Image: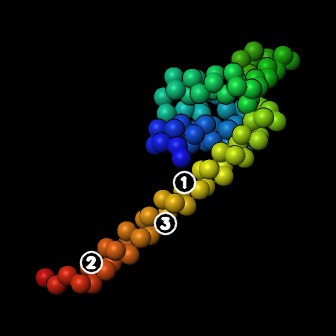
Amino acid sequence: MIDRMQAQQEDVRFRILRLLQDNPHLTQRELAGALGISLGKANFCVKALLDKGLIKLHNFKASRNKLAYSYLLTPAGVAEKAALTARFLGRKMAEYEQLKAEIESLKQECDVSPRV
């Protein structure tokens, strides 16, 4: 079982891998905006994914824009994204079940309490 902070870090990693797989040309600024995190945190996370070998950076040498990069998931990155997806889904399903139980409890409370 992972703690809340680890789960949040996994969620960010999962969302970054997911976004980069869908759009490898995102800049770190665009990535930060899409995730609602600071540019510094996005940079830190991208560097960590690069260091772990989960993504690789591809520079378009023929491009006129010398800052044109693409982030590509490596085979290890694809495997990690699949594992993160399963854990993310498990956490979200558990949250859903907890919310559903809380809603049912609140509905029963409303039915039992006297109406004003």
Q: Is residue 107 visible?
A: yes
The answer to whether mark 2 and mark 1 are in CB contact below 8 A is no
Q: Is residue 23 above or below residue 29?
A: below
| Kind of residue sitting beneath label 2 | Glu
Q: CA distance from mark 2 to mark 1?
A: 27 Å
* Residue 36 visible in the shown view: no
Q: Between residues 80 and 67, which one lies in front from this camera angle?
A: 80
- x and y, in percent, of residue 24 in the image: 73, 34
Q: Could you say whether the residue bearing mark 1 is in a helix, strand or loop?
A: helix
Residue at which label 1 appears: 91
Q: Which is more N-terminal, label 3 or label 2? A: 3
Q: Picture coordinates of residue 46 (x, y %)?
A: 63, 26
> What residue is rendered at 72% in x and 40% in y?
80
What residue did someone put label 3 on?
97
**Quick check: 79 above or below 97?**
above
* Residue position for label 2: 109
- Say which of 67 and 109 sits in front: 109
Residue at screen point 69% across, 46% down: 83
Amino acid type of the residue tagged 1 in the rendering: Arg
Q: Residues within 10 Å of mark 2 (few under 14, many from 20)?
A: few
Q: Is residue 3 left or right of residue 77?
A: left
